[in-house]
Image: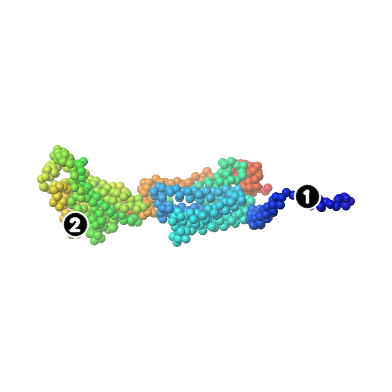
Amino acid sequence: TLELAALPLDVGSSGSRCYDDVLPGQSGLDESFVHLSKLFDGISRYVEPFRNFFENLLHPVYRVTTDVYAYMFFCDFINFFIMVFGYWAFGTGGSEDGVASYFQKNEVPVPFLIMLLAQFALIVIDRALYLRKYILGKLIFQVFIVFVIHIWMFFVLPGISQRSFVEEKNLPPKLWYFIKCIYLILSAYQIRSGYPTRILGNFFCKKYNYINYFLFKGYMLIPFLYELRSLMDWIWTDTSMNLTNWLKMEDIFANVFLLKCQRRAEEEYPTPRGSRRSSLTKYGLGGVMLFAIILVIWFPLLLFSLGNTVGQTLLPHDCTVELSLGGYEPIFKISAQQGNLRQLPYDSWVRLQAEYKSNAAAQAFLANYDAADVAVVTLNGNSTAIWTVSPPSQEALIAELRRSAVPLRLSWAFSRTVDNTNAEKVVSNERTVQLSDEHVRQSLADMLRGTPNNVTVPPILPRFLLVPRKGKSDVIRALDTPGMGPYRNLTLRLRTGAFNNLSARSEWWEVQEFCTESYPYPFLREEGSCTDLSLVVFNDKVFPQALSQLTGYGIAGLYTTFVLVVSRLIRGFMAGSAFSIMFDDMPNVDRVLQLCLDIYLVRESRELSLEEDLFAKLIFLYRSPETLIKWTRPADQQPLA
């Protein structure tokens, strides 16, 4: 107080003089700071709610953690297959046949591969965030995929596929988006609640019953899923184990869990000691397995024996016949299409069966076919192509005919429309006879010199032909009779003429066969049936698309692949258990299971030294049969601690 009283009274005035001496631009600078301060205050007022939201989200006062990762994975898993089988709706040029069309062509579109890899990468990233319990990373990942998905689904995809998202037929993208929305809801709930402090074991290993047992078995059967999960868990989990020990630990836990489910079922459904197994169990379980094994053994033969019953009729749409003499230009070529290649009438089919009713071999052959499987081919006797052999070649042919035997070759080919079946598109064959008769060869040579006569050649034209699914079109000998062989004679004649009285003249060959009402086809009683060449063709049925992949291997292929593989699987299930009795028949696995859970617990608590000690104890337990027997005794026989 005394010091204050001693101060000069003009302090205030001197202070005011100091403020009066401020530079002229200082006041404008102060005003700018004031405006900036107000601007920052205004921005802070709007940013503060966002900052508080993220602060409360990432660092709440209290949090009840939850674990919905398994459901999120199921959503991504379902979306993966929606994208595979519905790719036609996710890109340009996609076929509604789905992924099967690409597998048949052995082609994979690059956009299709990129989409699948992106979907797979999202699953891996989500698993990594889950194992690291990284909430901030999960939040960033959530915001990123929300923006990317909506930009892709509502802007990019409609422009690429030229389909609006709301189109009625555009179902796969809608279903994919719906499942993804469920995933985003679960993901947001996971972010809000936080990851669990301890992630112990598999999702299917929470309870010990038959449902969890079979679910876990199914999980183990999915190719590479167990291996991928084990590797990702080892990479993104803090542990003192190397990869080999980690895989040992996972394998031990899987085996112990399955044993625990079995022991729990035995406790809940006990079997009285010394009682025989019921007939229901024997015929229910054993009978089904016996029937399955017998079915596998006889499946290939059964499948192909029913081929003409469950198969589909496939008639050819084109038949081409060529006749050539030696190695020269074909002398006769004709094709039958449309009206000249028709199905055998049903009344003719009935007469055909009646004609061979006393022939057992013929009846056995005809039993495999119906009227719809038989086609009648009508061929014009005049060649559709002129004979354009050069004069020197013609002279060489004449000389060869007069000198030695010349081969006469008849070839035939059938073309079919093959759509998603294992049948060949073109089936063909040929027959060759040697013109050894000197009189026939001399007559042909004279005809080539200009003598107008007919020449009958040895039997070469088939009566009945078989068009199989694959292979060559052979002659049917089961329908031979004493008076009718498998082949017929042909009569050849070289014709010469001009078109519309033009000066240029052409040569072509005319082919005829001997034909009456009773030969060669007494069951065909149609007017004009003897004016042209005729062939009766039996066509094997083809398997439907669903069975084409199996039948493509053939009988031998199915036995060497399918049957042998299944037999190895069954043998592995029914034999070889003697070496694993010590580990598969533990009467009480509670203590071993608890040791495994303790290892998981100390690992999550980052007690890595204790993790090593407990794992060493588990390994010693499996290396010491005597100790393992003591640990796995029934509860009432356990020694007191």
Left or right for 567, reference 372: right
Left or right for 525, reference 26: left
Q: Which residue lies at the image location 71% right of the left edge and 52% below the top edge?
A: 27
Identify which residue, 18 or 396, lies in the foreground. Answer: 18
- Distance, label 1 to label 2, CA atoms, is 133 Å
Residue 167 in the image: x percent, y percent? 45, 60
Left or right for 157, reference 597: left
Q: Is residue 147 visible?
A: yes
Identify which residue, 341 or 242, lies in the foreground. Answer: 341
Q: Which residue lies at the image location 45% right of the left edge and 46% below the top edge?
A: 568
**Colour scheme in the image?**
rainbow
> What secondary structure is marked by label 1?
helix
Q: Which residue lies at the image location 65% right of the left edge and 55% below the top edge?
A: 43
Residue 552 in the image: x percent, y percent? 36, 49
Residue 382 in the image: x percent, y percent? 18, 51
Left or right for 458, reference 180: left
Identify which residue, 567 or 492, lies in the foreground. Answer: 492
Label at residue 529: 2
Inspect the image, locate mark 1, and give the three-letter code of the amino acid beneath it: Cys
Count of marks overlaid on the render: 2
Circle 1/circle 2 CB separation < 8 Å: no
Inspect the image, locate mark 2, and give the three-letter code of the amino acid beneath it: Ser
**Category of crowding for the residue at label 2, using alpha-carbon neighbours closer than 10 angstroms: few (below 14), some (14–19), many (at least 20):** some
Pick out the residue farthest to the right: 2
Q: Which residue is mark 1?
A: 18
**Category of crowding for the residue at label 1, using alpha-carbon neighbours closer than 10 angstroms: few (below 14), some (14–19), many (at least 20):** few
Residue 90 in the image: x percent, y percent? 46, 54
Q: Is residue 570 visible?
A: no
Label at residue 343: none
> What secondary structure is marked by label 2?
loop
Q: Which residue lies at the image location 61% right of the left edge and 43% below the top edge?
A: 239
Q: Decide which of tag 1 and tag 2 comes sooner along the chain.
A: 1
